[in-house]
Image (cartoon, grey):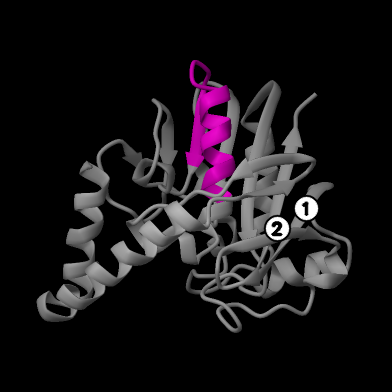
Amino acid sequence: MKQIIGSIKSVFRKEGFFRGLFIIPLKIIQYLYFKVFRRSSFTVAGKSYPYFYHLRNATFLKERAVEVAIGIDLFKAYRDKQVLEVGNVMNQYYTIPHDIVDKYEKNDGVKNQDIIDYNPDKKYDLILTISTIEHVGWDETPRTKDKFKIAIEHLKQLLAPGGLLYFSIPLAYNEDIDASLEKSEFPVEDIHFMKKTSRFCKWIEVAYNEVKDSKFDMNYLRANALLIGYFKKA
């Protein structure tokens, strides 16, 4: 309930009072429609997950329905472990005690630090980062070419033996990432591609060739294709 109230407040702040009075009932109707009539699941890397529907940020219309669903599953599995999140996303939907590093977002419990400079005195059993890696280096001034690779390699070093890194990245946002995929130079091998095929929250796993020409925020709202990646430390 606290998260829902926060979502409503954020709409009023963003859209204004009168526009918010129209948008909020519309989002609630959409949310109820998806919860009641569009219950379904998606499969990636051989595992099925229920789509994650939430009023906050209207996840039922965006990639959050997929990437947060995987995040929740991992949070449940690693509840009593050392967990790091890069980018403050999961706290909006489902949380467990964990460390959070976000360079820009000011919030309680969030370390405001560039991830490549983050060197804690411990290692992590799980590191997850949801739609954040694509911003590293790309949304900075000046841009730093291929900084996302440095970030991923650094996250690998922060894992404990047997630790897992999970990340989601929207395609067609960061040209450096897209180029690395095209040249088979992406720094993680266990990667999977999800393609959005309907505005009604339908995502399917496909081969890279089926998403390499996708556009961001074009046919569908926000990401039209997602990279889902995993790295398991030996």
Which residues, given as a range, are shown in magenta? 67-85
**Image quarter in which the C terminus is found:** top right
Q: Measuring 77% from the left and 79% from the top, which residue is drawn there?
A: 213
Asked if residue 14 is positioned above or below residue 68 in the image, the reply reads: below
Judge from the rendering whether residue 124 lies leftward or rightward of residue 8; answer left or right. Answer: right
Asked if residue 158 is positioned above or below residue 181 in the image, the reply reads: above
Q: Which of 127 and 6 is in front in this view?
A: 6
Q: Measuring 57% from the left and 23% from the top, which residue is drawn there?
A: 77
Residue 192 percent coordinates (x, y):
78, 53
From this viewpoint, which residue is outermost toward the bottom? 218
Judge from the rendering whether residue 127 lies leftward or rightward of residue 181; answer left or right. Answer: left
Judge from the rendering whether residue 121 lies leftward or rightward of residue 24; answer left or right. Answer: right
**Image quarter in which the N terminus is found:** top left
Q: Are marks 2 and 1 in contact (CB under 8 Å)?
A: yes
Query: Would residue 69 be counted in the magenta stretch?
Result: yes
Q: Can you see residue 116?
A: no
Residue 164 percent coordinates (x, y):
67, 31
Residue 168 percent coordinates (x, y):
62, 53
Q: Nearer the viewer, residue 111 or 107?
A: 107
Residue 176 percent coordinates (x, y):
70, 70
* Element marked by disc 1: strand
- Give residue 227's mark: 2
As measured in the structure, the alpha-carbon distance from the residue carrying label 2 to the one carrying label 1 is: 6 Å
Residue beneath label 1, please? 192
Q: Which of 198 and 74 is in front in this view?
A: 198
Q: What type is the residue that disc 1 sits on?
A: His
Circle nearer the N terminus (2, 1): 1
Q: Measuring 80% from the left and 57% from the top, which residue is drawn there?
A: 186
